[in-house]
């Protein structure tokens, strides 16, 4: 008996007991759909994190200066010199000074608007685009000019889109708006679009900081990030002679670390979901044992007509594998349905564009495992059927 004949007999046997076969497949269906959905969620989260880090700049290095263990204080000129000394690794640097300042437009107080002091390269490092006007320039920093660039939310909400040249007050001081940013996030009160950037010299004076403690460097390319980080750390160590006086974090390294943690978590969850595949395999073995008992006379007749042990074994193994494969196909379809439903639910509840995206690899893996489980758990009943004595089988009632 060839494989095609065995397959036809398997389909016929499954179709003759549709309800029982469907219940048998249920564990496989649930397991495959769960694995596909969970791996799809992990893939979607990885894409989402990569996009978020890309918006922050995967070539950026964040430097925090604590000065702990040293009496020396590094200046902004020293930090700019590090860039000048490593032109093949570093592209630019900007001081970053967060200010706890009140922002007012007329009589309105902007409670959730962030105020940040930055250098002239800040917008290019962050990859922020201007919709109107200009960014912070070197002359603004040098002369501590009271100028600012506002986010899209501030411009639309408080100036009806005509913010350029208007004035707002920061800690009681009037600042002229010289630039408006394009929309960065979703332009809401709690998003990145609700911000005001000013010259870092103004921000440092406003916050009474003697020395700036936070800087953002930009590497020339993704391939030079590691070397750029090493160069910055080396320069800072030469200055402080103490590696506890500073911290250098590469966004790309942080992304890799979070991706690894996410992959471990998703793998564990997928393995837990795959337990239902084993349960489904046990169900297949149980039903196949029942099927062997029900078809004992059929087996006896086939053996008396010349069927070999190998033919009987092959027939029942293929029947188990076919049952499991059909369950796997139904599980794949259900997995895509669950993925679409999960995407819609995430968007509705979290207002985030995170798509649950099943991968071809996860689909192939889940289907392959389902078929393998069918073969594995179908072998024992098939072996029992192949070993039946034809005389006893013919007399079986």
Image: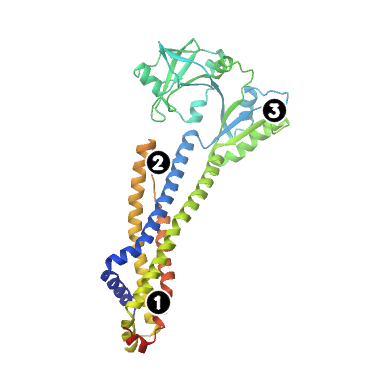
Residue identified by numbered label 1: 382
Residue positioned most to the front: 397
Residue 55 spot, x, y in % from top left:
46, 34
Residue pictured at 32% horizontal, 79% vertical: 295
Q: Separation of disc 3 and disc 2 at Cα?
A: 41 Å
Q: Quadrant of residue 177?
A: top left
CB within 8 Å, label 1 to label 2: no
Label number found at residue 354: 2
Q: Nearer the viewer, residue 394 or 158?
A: 394
Give the mark, 1 or 2, whose residue is nearer the N terminus.
2
Residue identified by numbered label 3: 68
Q: Separation of disc 3 and disc 1 at Cα?
A: 73 Å
Horizontally, is 374 left or right of 234 in the view? Answer: left
Q: Closer to the camera: disc 1 or disc 2?
A: 1
Residue 42 spot, x, y in % from top left:
45, 47
* Circle 2 residues within 10 Å: few <14, some 14–19, many ≥20: many
Residue pictured at 48% horizontal, 26% vertical: 123
Q: Quadrant of the N terminus?
A: bottom left
Say which element carries label 2: loop
């Amino acid at each position: 008996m060839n494989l095609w004949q065995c397959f036809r007999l398997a389909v016929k046997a499954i179709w003759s007991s549709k309800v029982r076969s469907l219940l048998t497949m249920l564990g496989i269906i649930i397991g495959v759909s769960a694995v596909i959905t969970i791996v799809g969620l992990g893939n979607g989260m990885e894409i989402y994190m990569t996009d978020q880090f890309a918006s922050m700049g995967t070539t950026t290095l964040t430097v925090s200066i604590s000065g702990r263990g040293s009496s020396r204080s590094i200046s902004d000129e020293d930090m700019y010199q590090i860039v000048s000394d490593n032109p093949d690794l570093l592209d630019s640097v900007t001081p970053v000074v967060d200010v706890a300042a009140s922002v007012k437009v007329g009589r309105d107080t902007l409670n959730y608007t962030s105020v940040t002091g930055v250098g002239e390269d800040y917008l290019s490092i962050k990859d922020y685009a201007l919709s109107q006007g200009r960014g912070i320039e070197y002359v603004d920093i040098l002369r501590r000019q009271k100028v600012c660039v506002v986010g899209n939310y501030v411009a639309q909400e408080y100036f009806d889109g005509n913010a350029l040249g208007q004035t707002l007050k920061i800690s009681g001081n009037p600042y002229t708006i010289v630039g408006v940013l394009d929309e960065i996030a979703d332009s809401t009160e709690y998003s990145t679009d609700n911000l005001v950037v000013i010259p870092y010299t103004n921000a440092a004076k406003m916050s009474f900081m003697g020395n700036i403690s936070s800087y953002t460097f930009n590497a020339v390319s993704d391939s030079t990030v590691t070397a750029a980080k090493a160069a910055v750390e080396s320069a800072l160590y030469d200055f402080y002679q103490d590696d506890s006086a500073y911290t250098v974090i590469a966004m790309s390294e942080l992304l890799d670390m979070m991706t690894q943690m996410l992959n471990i978590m998703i793998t564990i969850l997928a393995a837990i979901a795959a337990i239902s595949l084993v349960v489904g395999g046990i169900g297949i073995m149980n039903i196949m044992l029942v099927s062997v008992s029900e078809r004992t006379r059929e087996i006896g007749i086939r053996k008396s007509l010349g069927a070999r042990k190998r033919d009987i074994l092959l027939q029942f193994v293929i029947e188990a594998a076919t049952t499991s494969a059909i369950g796997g196909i139904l599980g794949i379809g259900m997995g895509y349905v669950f993925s679409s439903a999960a995407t819609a639910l995430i968007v509705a509840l979290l207002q985030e564009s995170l798509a649950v995206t099943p991968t071809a690899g996860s689909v192939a893996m889940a289907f392959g495992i389902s078929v393998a489980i069918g073969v594995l758990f179908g072998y024992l009943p098939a072996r029992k059927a192949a070993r039946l004595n034809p005389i006893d089988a013919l007399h079986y009632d």
